[in-house]
Image (cartoon, rainbow, N blue to C red):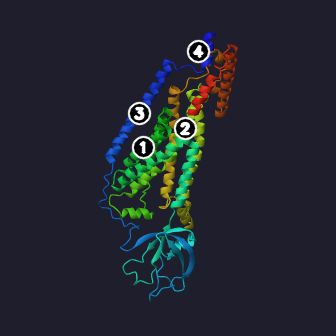
Amino acid sequence: MGSGHSHASTGHSEPTAEAIAARRKANRILAAILVPLTLLTVAGMAMLWPSGSKEGITLASPYSAAPGVTFDTGKIQSVVEENCMQGSAAAGPASDSTGQAAQPGSDCMFAFTQPDQGGSPVKVVVNPEVAKSHGVKPGDQIRYLNLSNAPGAAASQGSPAYIFVDFVRTLPIVMLALLYALVVITVARWRGLRALLGLVGAYFVLAGFMLPGLVEGKPPLLLALVGSTVIMIGVLYFAHGFSARTSTALLGTMFGLGITALLASWATDAANLAGVGSHDATTLINTSANISISGVILCGLIISGLGVLNDVTITQSSAVWELYELAPGTSARKLFTSAMRIGRDHIASTVYTIAFAYAGAALPILIIVMLYNRPLGDTLTSAELSEEVIRTLVGSIGLVLAIPVTTLIAVLVVKATGIRPDIQPDGGSGDAVERRVPAINPDDVGDTGALAAAAEAGRSRRATLAVEEAAASGNPGQGAAPETRRGRRADRG
């Protein structure tokens, strides 16, 4: 009874030499796979790093101004609708903000705006698209084009001297960003802060490596794979820490990323995605001979699925670990089956997430295509929608296939590196308390929730018996220690 009582007072026995060896072996296997992949990725990044040269690029920036012309900001004081010829002393017809001649008798919207740099209010003409769709109102901060000091401005009295350009959105965007950061840090705490910092790092990889590389004509498939892998390595380890759980999620993410890249490469060529239906693509084509629109689309197909792919792989990896800690005696097959029940729910919800996210971003195009009254098949395969449809399908396939692969890797790793089972079904090596608690065979429990409940019930019974035995031996403090240590480990998660 002495040895059994000693076992009961510690709850978990120290890992055996075999368990430690198995854990180290699993970590070595993970390292043997991930370290070469990481080094290969870093080498690829060094080879593909853009020079930063902008030779051969011809792009007329809409934000560049002619001599004497400035972009100013101000706050609207009042809004009026007047005849577009109002105040015009020129013989010829006045022009609206689009450069087209205003018809006699037509009305234009004008915003009397107080310049932020000081001075008297100026009369800014609002272009018809903004006036009809959103409009402007007193209190709005706007950016406008100041033509009053341009050469020849005095001679062209029929044209407006101040033209609306855009709204100033700095304050609401900064407020939303701060609120987002506050919510993330409040709920996720230190891990949420690390995730936000990782997002900043991902932005620098995108803006400093991938985008300049596309401009210089680097291979888009390699560029997307290398850049995306670097982002995932940095984000996962920085946000979740170095652990077997994170390494498992990273392996699953790399697998899904590879599948997505292969499918995107095939689909871009097979579906002839040339970007001909996009005004931005047309602008890029005329910017530089090195820019491949198909390459840009291919890179976009791969990048667009990164966030959701990372989400499902880290969730699946964590689910396997949590299920195993609730019932360490679970067999590998049962553990995989239970985790895949969670994965299937995640697949269903994530497919909806991807589809609706793309649909929301493409709403103006969807409305225009709907108004064309074309057949559904022609609509989905049209130049306007085909890219969004293929992006949804490619991203979803990579995501769905990554879930079982991540789950399988996690099960194999957790069985080697996980905690030692509390329950000894054979009764050969358990302590006195464990032998007095009926053993739970996890393979006999059909539902994941029931499995967790059964494991928790067994844990509570063992804790109660341990306390009773400790009290009987005159040392009541020992019985509560195992569950306390277990709780601290669960909190560290």
The residue tagged 2 is: 316
Rendered residue at 49%/52% (across/down): 391
Residue type, label 1: Thr
Residue type, label 3: Ile
The residue tagged 1 is: 229
Rendered residue at 35%/52% (across/down): 213
The residue tagged 3 is: 33
Q: Is mark 1 in CB contact (under 8 Å) with mark 2?
A: no
The residue tagged 4 is: 429
Badge 2: how crowded within 10 Å, few (<14), some, or many (20+)? many
The disc, 4 or 2, on the residue closer to the chain's N-terminal end is: 2
Badge 4: how crowded within 10 Å, few (<14), some, or many (20+)? few
The residue closer to the viewer here, 276 or 241, is 241
Residue 20, can we see it? yes
Residue type, label 4: Ser
Residue 281 in percent (x, y) is at 41, 62
Residue 156 location, quadrant:
bottom left
Query: Position of 246 compared to 59: left or right?
Result: right
Q: Disc 4 and disc 2: Cα gap in Å?
A: 32 Å
SS under mark 2 = helix
Foreground mark, 4 or 3?
4
Residue type, label 2: Gln
